[in-house]
Amino acid sequence: MRFLIIFIFLITDVLAEDVSSIKNIVIHKIPKIYDNVIILDKKDQKISTEDFKGKLLILNFWATWCEPCKEEMPSLDNLQAKLGLSKLKIFAINIGREDRNKVNKFFIDLNIKNLELYYDSPSTLAKTFSLRGIPTSILINKDGHEFARVIGSIDFENKKFINWIKNYN
């Protein structure tokens, strides 16, 4: 029994250590709860995150003029296609007030193939999640609660990050 407790402690410590090396990630001790988060798809149809309970969600807020957004988008695209993360759904949400053709061109220029475009044109989600800048990624667990966020850009193909989020997949 004592061996099991030590083993669990070591595993927990290793998992915490893995994510702690990623400086931009903030893990909430108490998950944040939001009511009915609505996202617009490319046809302006409303999508509720409530429809994705049971999945790990990443809401990534970005704009075409944001250079760090441009740098991280290919790794975010690859994360969506990553084997072993079948219950992951990424919403790449453009919060710029840009022409839709410019937003589409951004995805084409970066060769984004696994992500779909989503919008928050009235900036309601930016206010709901109290965004302080972009890129920002909100991580929502299977229960629909925000358990962490990434403030600024990261490499979403970082093995430590991938191993950490697999715990929530």
Image (cartoon, rainbow, N blue to C red):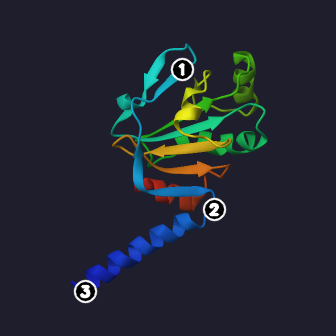
Name the secondary structure under disc 3: helix
**Marks 2 and 1 close (CB-CB < 8 Å):** no
* SS under mark 1: strand
* Residue drawn at (73%, 21%) of the image: 98
Q: Which mark is residue 23?
A: 2
Q: CA distance from mark 1 to mark 3?
A: 52 Å
> Mark 3 is on which residue type?
Arg
Q: Which residue is mark 1?
A: 41
Query: For mark 3, what is the residue?
Result: 2
What quarter of the picture does the N terminus occupy?
bottom left
Which disc number belongs to residue 20? none
Which residue: 34% across, 79% down?
A: 7
Question: Residue sitting at 36 percent across and 43 percent down?
Answer: 142
Label located before the other in sequence (1 or 3): 3
Q: Position of residue 102 (x, y in %)?
A: 75, 21
Q: In the image, is residue 27 above or below residue 124? A: below
Q: Amino acid at mark 2?
A: Lys
Alpha carbon separation for disc pair 2 and 3:
33 Å
Q: Are marks 1 and 3 in contact (CB under 8 Å)?
A: no
Q: Is residue 157 left or right of residue 64?
A: left
